[in-house]
Amino acid sequence: MSTSISGWILSAGLAAAQAAAPAVPPAPEVRFLELEAEAAKGAELYLVVSLEPPMVWIKSRGLELDRVPVTQVEVVEHRSSIGPSRETTALELPAQWRVEARPPDPTRRVLAPPVLRQWTGTEEAAPVTTAAPAPSVPEPPDRYTVALTGGWVLDLGPGGEGPSLAGRWAQAVADGWSVLRGRPPARRQTVRLELAPEDARRLHHLFRRGTRVLLVGSAF
């Protein structure tokens, strides 16, 4: 009788100890599988960016549709100043964001008539004119940024280029107003993808609002 009671007390103690013990976070590989399983539930495209090898994987329902080589993947933080400092920052991987706003699309145009006329109740005969040549469709930019959730920014484009002087001045003015209003200046955390211009243009149309972007340390 006493033996069974002792066993019951020991089992209860072990269960209590296991419940009280802090949960061990899953390994990065397991965590990535969990994130991708969630992303693969729907038919939407999602992007997986790996640090090693540097690559962007275009996927849907867990299947690889295409891949885009990247020269370098870097996680940096831009601090506020006239010439903002730029330093590498640590980030726990894997990480996941969603696109908050798609990048500007140069191919979208608003068409409007050249002259607005008041309706008179009768239609005027349109003059016979020769057909104008079709306008050329502009190419997507080869350098652009994508706003992500959590205040993060995805910066894509060829290397060797930094923020423009006008952009630095605009950021400095915005930071100055933040200080005057009693708010800390913004510190932009950025995932920088250095890749060829044609590859940056290939990815441009994929960044729609709500698109998932996963960042992993190594290829799966």
Image: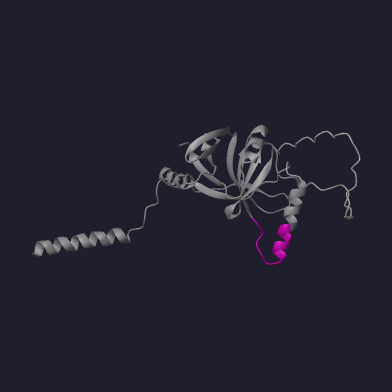
Residue with the most extreme bottom position: 182
201 left or right of 173 in image:
left
Query: For the view shown, which residue lies furthest in the left direction?
Result: 1
How many numbered tags mark residues here? 0
Write down the region rendered in magenta. 174-186
Q: Position of residue 210 (x, y in %)?
A: 58, 50
Here the colouring is one colour
The image shows residue 134 at horizontal and vertical percentages of 80, 34
Q: Is residue 122 visible from the viewing direction of this image?
A: yes
Please report the residue visible at 72 percent of the width from the left and 36 percent of the height from the top: 139
- As for residue 49 lying within the magenta part, the answer is no
- The image position of residue 213, as x and y in percent, is 55, 45
Quadrant in the picture for the C terminus: top left
Residue at horizontal 11%, vertical 62%? 4
Q: Is residue 50 visible?
A: no
Q: Is residue 137 depicted above or below 37 in this figure?
A: above
Closest to the observer: 84 or 93?
A: 93
What residue do we see at 67% from left, 32% from top? Answer: 198
| Above or below for 163 versus 172 | above
Q: Quadrant of residue 3?
A: bottom left
- Most distant residue in the front direction: 122
* 208 left or right of 122 in image: left
Q: Nearer the viewer, residue 75 or 145?
A: 145
Queried whether the magenta region covers residue 184, the answer comes back as yes
Tell which of 211 and 132 is nearer to you.
Answer: 132
Quadrant position of the N terminus in the picture: bottom left
